[in-house]
Image (cartoon, rainbow, N blue to C red):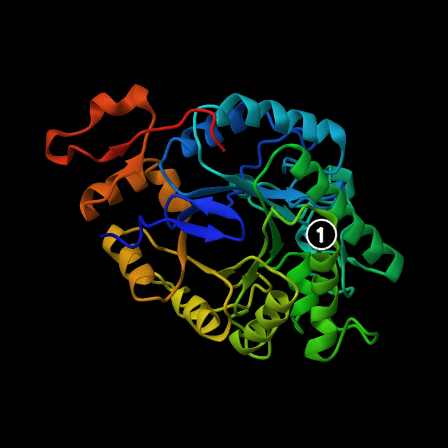
């Protein structure tokens, strides 16, 4: 029996298999509001047969957007727009849907990647960024404003407010974005955090704000809704955040009721030197999984069914997440199930496409079931 297609629980949330669709920014919202593109994008992913879909990084306040086109959940208008999208697509799939809540910190106020990704000046539609310290992400960029305690409390409360809106929308899971060089990661990494108060310096101090945000969100929302964290296991820069510190963070998060760790890497500095290759981050996930009891998700250039199966079967991670591979092949779980002799949930409107050589591939969809 395929381990990749075996069921799994994240907290109280039941997943049909071990395949997660990772959050992928679309840079296609208007004033933080989801629209028709999100209906198309999320709708096709919900028909993929994966076990879990996590909605893209969603800003908890306007200045926390990476680009002016980022999705947001900072007010009820954003929530209503996302609600319309979710209502239109979720009735056709039983797949659980989570959301990644984020703040870009000093990496905010940027162009979309296809426009070059450069920092936007206020005169060009950008805004002043905030960060743990007044250090720019790149030398040519304007330095951010260093957050004071009042600003940190505002952002913590914004994460809580966004999480509560997500729960009211019926989303099944919350993921806090502490990876890829964004604000929570900036507090963790000594490359971005040069504070001399209780939020800087030692490892315990640098972890403090991330843990405070997690604690506040976990306390505010119902226990049935899992709260996980995405982290960069290493900065890929000497003297930066590394896997040993990630293990320490995950141990603290587990003690506080964290539902899972979603293990990525990099993003804090243009000086990073990443050793790319198939499954290049899986070793980090494996190190963390050996150190903690909570579930661990591996991600990063996992695009082959046999590769994904071995990661789960060998206990290197509990789940695998796909992002770009899922965009390239939105039916990836169908094809993986066919290769591995497993069964996958698919909409009955598409059952006729089942190849004769793979009879029994499709399970029965339970329309409207959460």
Q: Does 301 sit left or right of 231 as displayed?
A: left
Q: Does 365 sit left or right of 149 as displayed?
A: left
Mark count: 1
Evaluate whether residue 137 shows in this view: no
Residue at coordinates 42% horizontally, 34% vertically from top-left? 45
> Which one is nearer the viewer's eye here, 327 or 153?
153
Q: How far across and how far down the image is residue 72, in percent?
A: 67, 37
Residue at coordinates 64% horizontally, 56% vertically from top-left? 182
Q: How far across and how far down the image is residue 53, in percent?
A: 47, 41
Residue at coordinates 62% horizontally, 26% vertically from top-left? 83
Q: How far across and how far down the image is residue 334, in percent?
A: 27, 38
What is the quadrant of residue 331 in the picture?
top left
Q: Does 55 sit left or right of 78 as displayed?
A: left
Residue 4, placed above or below residue 326: below
What is the quadrant of residue 179 in the picture?
bottom right
Residue 18, placed above or below residue 255: above
Q: How far across and how far down the image is residue 250, in percent?
A: 58, 68
Q: What element carries label 1?
A: helix
Residue at coordinates 54% horizontally, 43% vertically from top-left? 113
Residue 1, placed above or below residue 166: below
What is the quadrant of residue 312 in the picture?
bottom left
Evaluate whether residue 236 shows in this view: yes
Q: Does 312 sit left or right of 123 as displayed?
A: left
The single residue placed furthest to the right in the displayed view is: 150
> Which residue was labeled with disc 1?
217
> Which one is nearer the viewer's eye here, 63 or 262?
262
Residue count near mark 1 (Cα–Cα under 10 Å), binned few <14, some 14–19, many ≥20: many
């Amino acid at each position: 029996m395929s381990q990749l297609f075996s069921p799994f629980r994240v907290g109280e949330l039941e997943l049909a298999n071990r395949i997660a669709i990772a959050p992928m920014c679309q840079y296609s919202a208007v004033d933080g509001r989801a629209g028709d593109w999100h209906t198309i994008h999320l709708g096709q992913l919900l028909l993929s047969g994966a076990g879990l879909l996590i909605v893209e990084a969603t800003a908890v306040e306007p200045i926390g957007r990476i680009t002016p086109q980022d999705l947001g959940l900072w007010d009820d208008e954003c929530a209503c727009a996302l609600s319309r999208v979710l209502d239109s697509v979720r009735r056709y799939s039983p797949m659980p849907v989570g959301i990644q809540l984020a703040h870009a910190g000093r990496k905010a106020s940027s162009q979309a990647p296809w426009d070059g990704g450069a920092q936007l000046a206020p005169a060009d539609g950008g805004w002043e960024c905030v960060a743990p310290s007044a250090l720019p992400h790149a030398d040519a960029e304007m330095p951010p404003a260093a957050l004071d305690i009042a600003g940190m409390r505002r952002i913590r409360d914004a994460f809580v407010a966004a999480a509560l809106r997500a729960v009211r929308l019926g989303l099944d899971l919350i993921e806090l974005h502490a990876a890829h060089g964004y604000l929570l990661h900036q507090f963790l990494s000594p490359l971005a955090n040069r504070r001399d108060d209780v939020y800087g310096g030692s490892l315990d101090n640098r972890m403090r704000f991330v843990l405070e945000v997690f604690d506040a969100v976990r306390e505010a929302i119902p226990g049935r809704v899992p709260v996980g964290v995405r982290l960069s296991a290493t900065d890929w820069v000497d003297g930066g955040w590394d896997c040993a510190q990630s293990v320490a963070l995950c141990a603290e998060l587990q003690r506080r009721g964290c539902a899972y760790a979603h293990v990525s890497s990099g993003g804090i500095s243009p000086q990073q030197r990443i050793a790319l290759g198939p499954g290049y981050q899986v070793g980090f996930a494996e190190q963390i999984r050996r150190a903690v009891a909570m579930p661990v998700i591996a991600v990063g250039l996992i695009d082959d069914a046999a590769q994904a199966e071995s990661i789960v079967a060998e206990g290197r991670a509990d789940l695998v997440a796909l992002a770009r591979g899922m965009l390239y092949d939105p039916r990836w779980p169908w094809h993986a199930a066919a290769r591995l002799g497993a069964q996958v949930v698919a909409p009955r409107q598409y059952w006729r496409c089942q190849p004769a050589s793979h009879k029994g591939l499709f399970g029965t969809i339970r329309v409207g079931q959460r």
